[in-house]
Structures are given as C-alpha cells and as structure tokens.
Image (tube, rainbow, N blue to C red):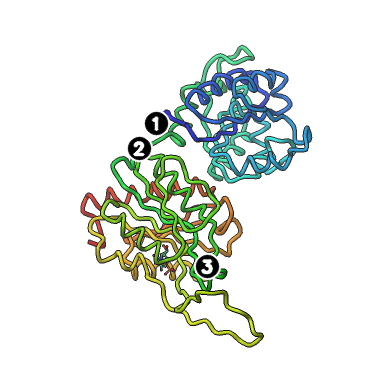
C-alpha cells in the first residue's frame, strides 16, 4: 500500500556525477510505482548520460536549460506543482549553489521557485564529502528543511574506498515512499470536508460572498481520500475539479451547506470545515433584479446558521476541525474561536502574509488544538499543508483514544 505513488508528481534533478546512471534505475522504480516524474538535468549531468534515456523512461520531456525554449514560465510553474524535488545524485557543486541561493541554471532556478519539499542524495569523492565547506553547506540545507540521504562507504570512481557513494536505490526510494506513499491511516473514517465560499443571494443576479478559491479544502479532501478515508466534500461554488474517489455535493448558500453537512452527519467521524461560510445574508432576498434609482441603498442582513456551533451539541465522538482566516491578532482570535465553537483543532492563517491564503497554491498556517498546543508550519504547498494537518489530526485522535481529551 505504501509503495503506491499514483497521483504524485516528482521532479527528479540529475547532476554531474558518475553516479548519474543510477538515477535511471530510481526513475524506473518511481514510474513503476505510478508517479509522474519530470527529469531536469544540469549540463554536466549530460556529460555522463543523455536526456533521451530519461525521456524514454519517464515518457515526458526532459528539461535541460533555462533558455532552451519559450516554455520558461511553464518550468517555473512546474516548481509550484510538484509534490517533491528529489536530487539524486547531488554533487558538491549543486549543494553549494542551492545552500547559497544561486540560481544560474534551470535546476537551481526551479528549486528556488517552489515550495515542494526537497530531498538530496549526495555522491562525490571522499575528500570532498569530508570537506568542511561541503559539511557547512549541508548543515545550511538541513536547517532549511532539506532532507539529506547520506552517501555510503565503498569503492569510489577514484579507486579509493571512502564515504561518497550514492546511497542505495532502496534507501532513496524508501525516503520517497515514506514521504509521499499512500499511508492508509484514515481507513475506516468518513471525513466530511467543506470547501470554497458560499453565495448569499441579494436578488437573482447579485450575492454576498467571501474570498475563497476552495483549494485548501480540496487539497484536504484529496489527501484524506489518499489515506484511505471515505471522503464527502461539501463544496460551495469553485472552478476546481472533484478529486478522484471523493463524493462531492455542490451547494451555494450557508443554509444549503448546513443541510448537506447535517444530511451526512450520521456517517461522519471527522469534520473539517475549511469553507469560507458567509456570516450574514440578506434578510429579504429580492425575487427580481433590484433596479438602481440613484439613491442610497440599505441591505438588511441576518446571521447565517453557524454550522460548527450547531454541530457542537451533537458531536458525539467526532473530531471537529475549523479554520480561522484572520488579518490581525491571529493567535488570540483563533484560540477564542476554538473555544467558542468547541473544536479539537483550528487551522489559523494570517491572510495578509505573503504566500498565504486566497487563490494561491501555497499556505502558511498555525495549528492550535484544544490541549493548547501550537504547531506553526512554514510556507508549504496546499497539498503538503493538507498532509501536515491530517498528520496532526491523527496524532490528536490517538491521544483522545488513550483518554487524553480536554473536551470530553
Ligand atoms: O466564525 P468564523 O466564521 O470566523 O469561524 C470560522 C470557522 O467556522 C470555519 O471553519 C468556518 O468553516 C466555520 N463556519 C461555520 N458556519 C458559519 C461560519 C463559519 O461553520 N456560519
């Protein structure tokens, strides 16, 4: 189950080491596991092996230069889309460049252009591996969250026995499978995710809404389905396609969202309210288009049903997770909301921060739970953010099973 990478997109960076031929074997295994792999080669890598080999095995174009086509922009969006960047083999040169933010070719540009987690498997001569400059660069990368798969000891190309051989194919694949493979740790759960905005009609052509693309909720639905849950996605209007294997119910208003959630409440074991539900709606929506007459216009608003607050009384053993999008005093606002709505966890994001919030493919969130514990996540793709949110929920669930639950 864990060796299943279907639906995952990996950027495989190949740099100029004699071990470059081993990345062909890695590529083959990733493709066999169902991953989509885009190979990017440095110019020195092409001295050891040709792009054609990778192109045939990945069944995709291989990118080699920042300037070889007018598709440069697409290359950069590629960095936004991948689930992981794996550089194997990684030379001392690429390690040094990435550690210091140098982006002078396609691969180094891509790694600085996206939020995907990065894994590197260095391969080099033993003297180079032990050199303090290289070790310092590795510790910089380590501090930035790059996972390094250390090389092994053995005969090197120079004929010497030392540490510097690329880690075994099995070791490298184990890291990829561990980080991206299907975990199935939500098997048996029914996860209800709400996503997107709601629209509250003013008249047949106008409505009140909140800014929301639905991307965070959809990423959560996809990730939960991937982990083996039955997933019901109650979605307000978005342009996003329904993730494979997810049951989607399309709604428009807060009232419809509430009804859809209640209609599936009996089956639900975990509720994640990622939707940006409108808090108010026009009290008397007009049946016909309201005509303008040049004078001031007053709209009388009434509160919409607070779905989370309503479900609190009938929560049973369900886990409730909410979202708080704030523009100030994030921590305090989110904690107040957590308590008021009786949540197990709240995902707080300051939407004024660069790289967080609406319409982006990345987010920066803080997870605050009913134990009072806080986990601040860095800027990550929404897909990776969803994984971390689910990891934390699973952790809280196992604690609550063990009797450690502040709410019950
Ligand atoms: O109260 P506020 O809208 O700031 O709280 C946000 C959280 O509550 C989100 O998880 C949102 O989906 C949920 N919510 C709700 N019903 C509402 C408004 C928000 O369940 N009417």
For mark 3, does the 10 Å Cα neighbourhood hold few (<14), some (14 to 19), or many (20 or more) residues? some
Q: CA distance from mark 3 to mark 1?
A: 40 Å
Q: Tell me residue 324's x, y (percent).
A: 45, 64
Residue matched to label 1? 2
Is the residue at mark 2 in contact range of ligand 1, meaning its CB lies under 8 Å from it? Answer: no
Q: Quadrant of residue 95?
A: top right
Q: Residue at x 38, y 55 (%)?
A: 272
Say left or right for 109 vs 291: right
State the residue lying farthest toward the front. 288
Which tag, 3 or 1, sits closer to the chain's start? 1
Q: CA distance from mark 2 to mark 3?
A: 36 Å
Mark 2, secondary structure of its residue:
loop
Of the 4 image quadrants, the one containing the N terminus is: top left
Mark 1, secondary structure of its residue:
loop
Q: Tell me residue 25's x, y (percent).
A: 55, 19
Q: Residue at x 35, y 37 (%)?
A: 184
State the residue lying farthest toward the top. 159
Q: Nearer the viewer, residue 216 or 298?
A: 298
Q: Tell me residue 381's x, y (percent).
A: 54, 48
Q: Nearer the viewer, residue 50 or 129?
A: 50
For mark 1, does the 10 Å Cα neighbourhood hold few (<14), some (14 to 19), or many (20 or more) residues? some
**Which numbered marker is on residue 209?**
3
Residue matched to label 2? 184
Of the 4 image quadrants, the one containing the C terminus is: bottom left
Q: Residue at x 54, y 41 (%)?
A: 117
Look at discs 3 and 1 and give the one toward the viewer. 3
Which tag, 2 or 1, sits closer to the chain's start? 1
């Amino acid at each position: 189950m864990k060796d299943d990478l279907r639906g995952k997109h990996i950027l495989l960076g190949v740099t100029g080491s004699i071990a470059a031929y081993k990345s062909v074997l890695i590529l083959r295994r990733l493709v066999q596991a169902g991953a989509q792999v885009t190979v990017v080669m440095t110019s020195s890598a092409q001295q050891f092996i040709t792009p054609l080999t990778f192109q045939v095995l990945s069944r995709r174009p291989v990118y080699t230069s920042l300037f070889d086509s007018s598709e440069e922009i697409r290359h950069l969006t590629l960095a936004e889309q991948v689930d992981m960047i794996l550089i194997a083999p990684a030379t001392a040169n690429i390690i040094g460049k990435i550690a210091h933010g140098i982006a002078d070719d396609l691969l180094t540009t891509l790694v600085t252009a996206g939020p995907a987690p990065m894994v590197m498997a260095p391969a080099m001569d033993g003297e180079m591996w032990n050199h303090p400059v290289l070790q310092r660069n590795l510790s910089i990368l380590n501090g930035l969250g790059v996972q390094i798969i250390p090389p092994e000891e053995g005969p090197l190309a120079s004929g010497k026995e030392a540490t510097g051989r690329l880690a075994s194919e099995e070791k490298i694949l184990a890291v990829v499978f561990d980080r991206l493979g299907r975990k199935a740790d939500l098997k048996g759960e029914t996860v209800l995710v709400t996503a997107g905005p709601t629209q509250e009609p003013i008249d047949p052509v106008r409505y009140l809404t909140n800014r929301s693309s639905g991307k965070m909720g959809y990423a959560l639905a996809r990730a939960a389905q991937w982990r083996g849950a039955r997933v019901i996605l109650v979605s307000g209007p978005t342009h996003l396609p329904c993730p494979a294997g997810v049951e989607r119910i399309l709604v428009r208003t807060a009232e419809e969202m509430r009804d859809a959630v209640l209609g599936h409440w009996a089956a639900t074991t975990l509720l994640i309210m990622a939707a940006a539900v409108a808090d108010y709606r026009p009290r008397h929506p007009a049946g016909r288009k309201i005509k303008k007459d040049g004078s001031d216009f007053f709209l009388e608003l009434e509160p919409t049903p607070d779905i989370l607050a309503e479900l609190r009384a009938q929560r049973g053993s369900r886990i409730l997770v909410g979202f708080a999008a704030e523009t100030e005093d994030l921590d305090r606002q989110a904690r107040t909301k957590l308590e008021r709505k009786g949540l197990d966890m709240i995902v707080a994001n300051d939407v004024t921060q660069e790289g967080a919030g609406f319409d982006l493919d990345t987010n920066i969130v803080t997870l605050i739970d009913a134990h009072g514990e806080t986990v601040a996540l860095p800027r990550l793709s929404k897909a990776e953010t969803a994984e971390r949110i689910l990891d934390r929920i699973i952790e809280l669930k196992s604690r609550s099973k063990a009797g450690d639950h502040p709410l019950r």
